[in-house]
Amino acid sequence: MPIAENFPEGLKPLGKISDGEGHFHIMWGPGRSDAEAFSDADVKAAYEARGEEQVPLGVSGTMVAVDWDSCVADGACIEACPVQVFQWYRTEKDIAAKDVVGQTFEGTGSSVKDERKDMTDKADPIREHDCIWCMACVSVCPPQAI
């Protein structure tokens, strides 16, 4: 489901996700349990295999916003981005997505499509400040989570 251009108007900041260089982006919520990831069999199975509850997460980022409730960990955005805005967050810190807010990441996670930990991983716009607005990520995302 596409993110509305004015998405922050209906959400509130849940906290921030920082990188090691002092940049950060906002996690917006509340999340939605009616989004694509909640009906995707592979995503549901991955959460079950980890023993993690799948909970609504919200939208990660402001300039480059990824709806983590719609993201099905396809990785097309990671592969398409010419400036490596995204990383698989679990490849740097293998923690539940609900625990990411308030964390600092160094940006050392994988930016390779097939290197995600599993289908619970999310593409995080850790370097959204580097975005060149080419929209490649938007055009390739299967559930239109960006």
Image (tube, rainbow, N blue to C red):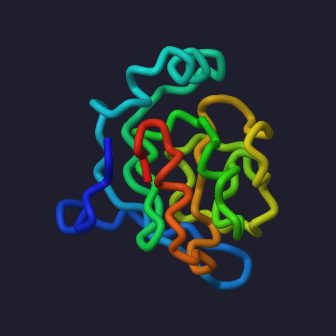
Residue farthest toward the left in the current orientation of the protein: 10
Q: Is residue 132 left or right of residue 26?
A: right
Rendered location of residue 23, percent (x, y): 61, 82
Count of labels shown?
A: 0
Q: Residue at x 55, y 44 (%)?
A: 97
- The quadrant in which the C terminus is found is bottom left
Task: Name the residue located 50 percent from the left edge and 44 percent from the top edge.
Answer: 141
- State which quarter of the image contains the N terminus: top left
Residue closer to the observer: 39 or 141: 141
100 up-or-down from 25: above or below:
above
Figure check: 16 above or below 55? below
Q: Is residue 24 left or right of residue 15?
A: right
Q: Nearer the viewer, residue 98 or 4?
A: 4
- Residue at 35% in and 61% down: 28
Residue at 40%, 55% in the rendered image: 59
Considering depth in this image, is 18 or 78 the residue closer to the camera? 78
What is the x, y in percent for residue 49?
Answer: 64, 16
Where is residue 52 drawn, in percent x and y? Answer: 56, 26
Res. 32 image quadrant: top left
Q: Position of residue 139 (x, y in %)?
A: 48, 51
Q: Is 110 displayed left or right of 79 in the figure?
A: right
Horizontal side of residue 47 vs 40, given as left or right: right
User: In which quarter of the view is residue 115 placed?
Assistant: top right
